[in-house]
Each structure stands twice: as C-alpha cells, then as structure tokens.
C-alpha cells in the first residue's frame, strides 16, 4: 500500500502527487497501544518509554513494599508528628478501656479526697468548738496538723493511681501498634507483677520533688528568720536561684528517666535496670524526647485551662447576679456556688483523664521508636504480626528481649 505522504521526486509517476504539491492529510490509523495512549509522531510504533510506570508516580518502584500497618502506625521509625497524632488515636481507638479507666480513677480520687480531707477537717474542728477556752489554742493547732496529715493520703493515693495508669496505658499503646485492642482485664494480666516497680519509681520521683521543694523553702525560711533586710533579700534571691538550678536538673533527669515505666512493663525489667535502660535509649535523642514530653504536657495544661475557664467565669457571673449585695448566706447562692464547683471539678476530671491517656501513650510511642531506631525492633514486630496472621498461637512477646 502506497503511503500518500511519502516523498516523490519531480518527473516521477503521474498517478502520484508531485513534489511540492499540497495533498489532503490522510486519516491517522487508530492507535495500537492501550486506550488513551497517543501514537508517536516519528513512526507507527508507540514510544517504549510510555509502557513503564514512572518511578516518580503513584506506584512504588519494583521490589519495594511499604511497611505493614496493623494498628496505629506503620512498623518503621516514627516521625514527630506521627507520635503526637497517634497519642490521641490511642484514646479514640479504645475509649472504654483508656478513657473509662482513667475517668473512674479520677472519680475515686475525688471521692477519697472529699471523704478523707473533709471528714477529718469536720471532726477536728468540731473539737475546737467544744474545747475549753484555755485549751482552744492547743486544740486548734492539733486540728490543723491533723488536716495536713490527712491531706497527704489523697496525694499518696494519686501517686499510686498515676503509676498504675501509666503502666496500663503504655501496654495498651504497644498492643495497638500490633493491631490488638485489649480490655482492662487483659491489660491487668499483662501488667501483673510490675506494679511494685512502677510504684517504687513513682515514689522516688515524688520524694525527689519533695526534697527539692524543701531545700528551696528551707533557704528562704532561713533568710527570713534572721530578721534583717539583707538576710531576707539574700534568702529570697538564693531560693530563686537554687530553685531554677534544681528545675533544670529535674527536667534533665525527668527526660532521661521518662522511659522507665515502658521498660518496666514491656521488658519486665527490675527497677534499677529499667532506669539504666531508659537512660541508654534516650541518649542521643534527648531533645526529640524532650519535645514530645514537653509539648504534650503544655497541650494538656492549656486544654484544661481553656475548658475550665468559661465555667468558672460563668458561675462567677451567676453568683454576682444571685447575691448582688455580697450576701453569701442565702440558700440560692450556696446552691449556685456548689453546682459551679462540682461542674468545674467534673470537667477538670474529664480533661485530666484524657490527658493521662495521651501523655502515657506519647511516652510509650517514643520508647518503641527509640528501640526501632537503635535495635531494629520493627523487624521483630513485623515477624510477630506475620506469624499471627498465619494462624500461629502462643507467640512470644515481641517487646521482650530474648533471654541470653
């Protein structure tokens, strides 16, 4: 078949168009390639470069597979943003176990605080009213000391509850990374035998805080007790400088030991070994760990203030409307004030419960990320997920290091 667009020399066949004549363009043949592919202007064959997918397109290069994502995040090193977003997803994926447990703990702490502190104060100061005039001072001093000692009970209980919740939520975070979702009973079974070490670490942190506060207060009190203007000024300035120094040291130690609860419950290490383990994991990634811990802490504090401030302001306005003359003995004023206080406490408990979950989850994710980057833990986690999908049962815990 003759190509109508072919070149012809002058004086050639009269049946063919002469050189330089304008001829109508022939209709192009339908493309032979896949639908949507344009034929090459340089020939009948399509360009071979259109057959292969671009390495910069949506499809990954041949031989590459993305890391599996059975749960919260893909099993590979985590980015800073992924750690923050996944910390909130831990709360959203299993709210009954996480938020429900944390809220129940907050309610129990509130009831114990009201019962112990309020009951002790009522009983102690009732003796003051019935005491003889010459015994009033002694009975009042004893009542104040009794109330102060009774207020330590809720503080100690909060330390215990915080330690237990942190261990449980770290376990929940580690299981969600594997695509599992446990109830409170399952988490409690996994954490059995680890609560003593958790309580020991929390008690040590609380004791260190109390000692630091006592040192600062002692320096200030010593300077004020001397009585002179110079000693008071020196005592206050020294207390401020010592407090700032202890704050820096405290932040440094807090970040270095922030992974201790994770090492205790996931690797089931003893107390001292968990401290060494946390220090070695954080080494080389101090500022990244500090950024996560500090940012989550600031977010929780800001959220608490933003949520509770409108309630406090609203009930303050109501109190002014109910008692415009300052008469605070009316029944209506007491009811409005009591309702506002209870509602504020309830909202604070809800925000605190969410914050405890997010804070523990963020620390747990930092721990897993550090082990992935330094030890290749992601390979063990992927192997565990694949064996579980293959139907194997009684698998070893991938977070526990092999026995040597």
Image (spheres, rainbow, N blue to C red):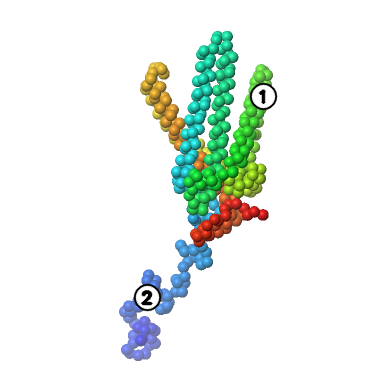
Residue 32's x, y, as percent?
A: 38, 76
Quarter of the N terminus within the rendering: bottom left
For the point 57% across and 11% down, which residue is it? Answer: 135
Tag 2 residue:
31
Looking at the rendered structure, the secondary structure element under dot 1 is: helix
For the point 53% across and 44% down, which residue is it? Answer: 188
Q: Nearer the viewer, residue 315 or 259?
A: 259
Q: Earlier in the sequence, mark 1 or mark 2?
A: 2
Check contact, mark 1 vs mark 2: CB within 8 A: no
Tag 1 residue:
234
Residue 395's x, y, as percent?
A: 55, 56
Q: Nearer the viewer, residue 155 or 223?
A: 155
Where is 4 relative to 185, above or below?
below
For the point 50% across and 45% down, which residue is it? Answer: 185
Q: Is residue 88 visible?
A: no
Q: How many marks?
A: 2
Where is 265 relative to 204, above or below?
below
- Marks 1 and 2, how far apart in space? 92 Å
Residue 74's x, y, as percent?
A: 51, 55
Quarter of the C terminus within the rendering: bottom right
């Amino acid at each position: 078949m003759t190509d109508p667009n072919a070149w012809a020399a002058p004086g050639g066949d009269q049946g063919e168009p002469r050189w330089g004549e304008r001829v109508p363009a022939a209709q192009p043949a339908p493309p032979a390639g896949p639908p949507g592919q344009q034929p090459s202007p340089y020939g009948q064959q399509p360009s071979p470069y259109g057959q292969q997918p671009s390495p910069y397109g949506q499809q990954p290069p041949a031989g590459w597979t993305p890391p599996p994502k059975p749960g919260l995040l893909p099993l590979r090193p985590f980015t800073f943003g992924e750690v923050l977003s996944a910390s909130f997803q831990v709360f959203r994926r299993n709210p009954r176990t996480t938020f429900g447990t944390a809220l129940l703990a907050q309610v129990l702490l509130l009831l114990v605080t009201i019962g112990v502190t309020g009951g002790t104060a009522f009983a102690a100061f009732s003796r003051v009213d019935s005491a003889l005039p010459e015994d009033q001072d002694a009975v009042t001093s004893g009542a104040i000391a009794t109330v102060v000692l009774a207020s330590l009970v809720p503080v100690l209980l909060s330390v215990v509850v915080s330690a237990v919740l942190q261990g449980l939520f770290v376990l929940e975070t580690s299981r969600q990374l594997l695509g599992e979702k446990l109830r409170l009973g399952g988490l409690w079974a996994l954490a059995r035998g680890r609560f003593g070490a958790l309580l020991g670490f929390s008690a040590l942190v609380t004791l260190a805080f109390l000692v630091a506060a006592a040192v600062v207060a002692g320096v200030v009190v010593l300077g004020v007790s001397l009585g002179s203007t110079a000693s008071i000024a020196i005592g206050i300035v020294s207390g401020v400088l010592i407090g700032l120094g202890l704050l820096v040291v405290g932040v440094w130690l807090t970040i270095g030991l922030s992974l201790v609860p994770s090492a205790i419950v996931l690797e089931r290490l003893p107390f001292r070994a968990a401290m060494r383990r946390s220090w070695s994991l954080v080494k080389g990634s101090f500022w990244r760990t500090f950024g996560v811990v500090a940012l989550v802490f600031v977010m929780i504090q800001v959220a608490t203030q933003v949520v509770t401030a409108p309630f406090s302001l609203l009930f303050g306005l109501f109190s002014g409307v109910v008692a415009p003359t300052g008469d605070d003995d009316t029944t209506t004023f007491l009811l409005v004030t009591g309702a506002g206080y209870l509602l504020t406490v309830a909202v604070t408990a809800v925000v605190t419960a969410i914050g405890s979950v997010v804070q523990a989850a963020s620390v747990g994710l930092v721990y897993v990320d550090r082990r992935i980057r330094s030890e290749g833990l992601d390979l063990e986690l992927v192997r565990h997920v694949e064996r579980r999908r293959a139907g194997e049962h009684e698998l070893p815990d991938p977070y526990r290091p092999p026995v040597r």
